[in-house]
Amino acid sequence: MSTASNGASTWKSDIAFALLAALLLLALDLYAGFPQLANPAGDNDSLLQLVEVRDLLAGQGWFDLHQYRMGLEGGFVMHWSRLLDAPLALGMLALSALTGSAALGEQVVLVLWPLLQFWLALFSIMRAARAFAGEHAVLPAAVVGGAALYYLGIFSPGALDHHNVQLMLTLAGLALLLEAPRHRTAALFAGACATLALAIGMESAPYAGTLGAIVALLFLVSGGGERLIARDFGLGVTAVSALVFITTIPASAWGQTQCDTFSTVHFVVAALAGAGLAVIASWGAANATYGRRLVSLGLLAFVLILVVMFLFPQCLAAPYAGLDPRLQQMWLGHIDEAQSIFQLVAADPARAVARFATPLVAIVLMALRLGKGGWRRQDSLVGALLVVAFLVSAWEVRGSTFSIAFAVIPLCAWIAKWRQRAENSPSGGSVLRMAAAWLISVNAVWSSAAEAASSAFQTGAAVTNAGIDAPCNSKASFAALARMPDTTVLAISNLGSPILAFTGHRALAGPYHRNVAGNLLVFDALLGSATDAKAVVANHRVGIVALCRGNPETRLLATKAPDGFLAGLMHGSVPDWLEPVAETQGAPLELYRVRTAG
């Protein structure tokens, strides 16, 4: 069989295998009744993503990224990209037309969209594992990769936020670069994937940058063997960054620098880097020798540094350096995904083990490979991404979403090695080692062991009623609020996205760093006195105050200000300008109507 036909065969088998795993996941969700659709479990980003898509379908402009129903009157501009809104909106339009129901079309998209990302992500892991370690690594990639993606929880029904798409695109870029020596157009599409991941959200910047840097370094070291790959990757980055810039940013904003979303700075840097790499790789005078490549690529890096330092210096600061100190202390400091590895170990060691064990094992495996010599281009790509993702996750735990997925590839190579030994030289020892490699590579095993150990040392654990939605995450908790006439709601930020998604009301607060004024105003009301809260209510035409006693944010704010308005409300001190809504008393979400005379 020819190499081309064999390659086509493996693509088909990998697609089918990944699709089978995705259908199995769908069957499990179907058997459970898609509980995530009724209870998003605090997935605020997915809820607000849904609201943005609804707004787009309702006629809000393509370039208008305001969220008018959150924050002060007039809303605020979100930092998310329309690149994600577009396919979701098109899917809802198509399925609504097909089913004859807009609500049903939306529900189908809520199920199929994350499932599609799971399929593509698992397919990319399988292709990457095949290119990294051969045929024997494909089955482990399907099993361990599928388990890892499922563990991450970002592919559940209703998961519309950008994290699953970013991970899928980054894995696709990695898999394409691993296969680039055998497939001519792979590097071009790898550059496109890396740039799209960056354009959708800045969380992908470290990984897109790492892929570009490794492509350049491989070209520097290997020269002609990597020249076409570097050229095509650079062309892909340049073309897609220009396309994204033109289609998602209005001409009136081309001169504006926004560091937290794709804007002029990202376009300039990406286009300059991509075009520069493509030119150097295409121009013989610049790449004929190692010395010339070193000088050319060094000059390109120097120019990029100068451009950022002198044209966009504000983007060199920490992402939240300019955030109001109160928001940093009482909001950002308590976001789970923004915690460092040290904070996570102190607060939840079991979760720390589950998040960091497999990436650490994978890094050890890569280090052992390096120590034995024979380092390959595949090792450079996978190892660099894995180490960068681990370092990001040590700074902010959200990075573990990527490190866990990247870790699957060297772990599958490890399993494949012991599978081959067990097949070629069957013995009790080789079989046991193979079994141990399987177990050590699965996140669920580490998670279960850590949870069991944590439970063994935990005493006096609180017993909760599973039927009560204490944090007010489910749609049912907002049913009474949805029946009330639309108004502005004063509530903690964790309730902002559910209020917008499940009702027609406005919310002053929401867990988004650009909603500074709205979040600070809510702090003033909830942490201040009842008189302070009344002033906020009157000045901003608030019609309802919502209280969720079981939400961690509520308890945090009440502890911060035990004499404040929120703490008083929790203890039954209801000011005379509020009227309790009788049907909600004792419910997870208690509502208080503002008296018109008050």
Image: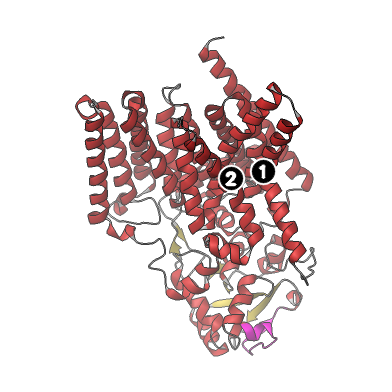
Q: Amino acid at mark 2?
A: Val
Labelled pair 2, 1 in contact (Cβ < 8 Å): yes
The residue that mark 2 highlights is 361
Q: Position of residue 294 (x, y in %)?
A: 25, 36
Looking at the picture, the colour scheme in use is secondary structure
Is disc 2 placed on a helix, strand or loop?
helix
* Residue depicted at 60% across the width and 22% down the height: 12
- Judge the density around disc 2: few (<14), some (14-19), many (≥20) Cα neighbours within 10 Å: some
Q: Which residues are magenta?
A: 567-581
Which residue is depicted at the point 42% across and 46% down? 198
Q: Earlier in the sequence, mark 2 or mark 1?
A: 2
Image position, residue 266 (x, y; %): 34, 48
Front-most of residues 152 and 577: 152
Q: Is residue 280 left or right of residue 330?
A: left
Q: Specify whether 76 is left or right of 316.
A: right
Residue 276 at what x, y percent from top left? Answer: 26, 36
Residue that extends furthest to the top in the rendered view of this protein:
1
Q: Is residue 425 left or right of residue 518?
A: right
Three-letter residue code for mark 1: Ile
Q: Is residue 206 above or below residue 127?
A: below
Alpha-carbon span between mark 2 and mark 1? 8 Å
Q: What quarter of the picture does the N terminus occupy?
A: top right
User: Would you name the residue on which mark 1 appears?
Assistant: 440
The image shows residue 79, relative to residue 190, as above or below, that is below
